[in-house]
Amino acid sequence: KRALDSARLALRMDRIAPFYQPKVCLATGMVKGFEALLRWHDHGLRLQSPSALALAFEDAELSIQITDKMLDSVIRDCLEWKAAGIEVGRIALNASSADFRRRDLADRILARLGKAGLPTSCLELEVTETVFLGKHSGIVESTLETLSDAGITIALDDFGTGYASLTHLQQFPVNVLKIDRSFVAGLSQKRAPIVDALLHMAQSLDIETVAEGVETLEQAAYLRAQGCVMGQGYLFGRPIAASCVPLVLAHQE
Ligand code: G
Ligand code: G
Ligand code: NA
Ligand code: MN
């Protein structure tokens, strides 16, 4: 109850904002885009991660408000970067399972992008494999089809940890697989058959790969050697405020 109240308050007080974590091309080290990760300020204005809002994500109405808030903020940030002539690449937004219990997610996204005059190519939607399960998978399929047809990239988050099967990769329009950081954490020079298999499977399906939680050069080198295209993690950068994004991009030129 207290947690729900804090979430409502954070929304109302405009204390929720996306922080941006770079996604880097493993071959060149260049930043190709960012994932928008929710951060919020509590009563003491301390910066908090979403885990303290976990209960809010169990509340369908609040989850949807949070997604809308993140979407609006990402669009506003993209417009500012665009006006400043800064090319940030694709920005990935996380959807929650509540977003797929209604039929309007694609409309909400496409209408806002259209109103802002931003191309669909600037947005990626990250979904976790759990959304594929259960009685709402019909909505998930049609929503993802609509978004994908409109030019929005669909990424499957935390791949390998949940219940996604190869059937899902065939049924849903998935453009990007994010290899969960639990697989990346164990990587050294030694062979890692599961990571190898995931990467090779993605390659044969023509699906782009992003490794999450890359913290060491050794992990990055291993992943690159196995053909993983992109990396994300503390090695390349932590999530940062929108105002810091131009600095990161200027630094790499
Ligand atoms: O950034 P951090 O490690 O604290 O994120 C914790 C969890 O919260 C991760 O699973 C991440 O995917 C999720 N998360 C972060 N931002 C958002 C968001 O805007 N919406 C949703 N639904 N989940 C988010
Ligand atoms: O579930 P999702 O993959 O969206 O969660 C992303 C979470 O992982 C974010 O909370 C982010 O802060 C965290 N994260 C990002 N990079 C790293 C990393 O290199 N190591 C660890 N341990 N966590 C990371
Ligand atoms: Na994510
Ligand atoms: Mn993830």
Image: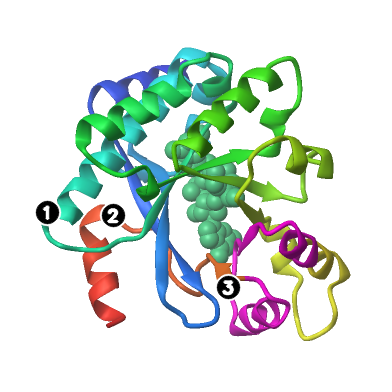
Which numbered mark, 1 or 2, is in the foreground of this view? Answer: 1
- SS of the residue under disc 1: helix
How far across and down, in percent of the image, does residue 190 sit?
83, 83
Q: What residue type is labelled 2?
A: Ala
Q: How is the image coloured?
A: rainbow
Which mark, by number, is residue 215? 3
Give the vertical position of 178 relative to 111 (above or below): below
Image position of 98 (left or right of 200): left
Residue at x-position 38% and y-position 23%: 108
Q: In terms of image quadrants, where is residue 178? A: bottom right
* Disc 3 within 8 angstroms of ligand 2 (CB): yes
Image location (x, y in percent) of residue 53: 48, 30
Q: Distance between the residues labelled 1 and 2?
A: 18 Å
User: Which circle marks residue 83 in the picture?
Assistant: 1
Q: Nearer the viewer, residue 186 or 7?
A: 186
In terms of depth relative to the viewer, which is nearer, 29 or 112?
112
Q: Where is residue 106 in the image (x, y as percent from the top left)?
A: 45, 26
Disc 1 marks a residue whose amino acid type is Ala
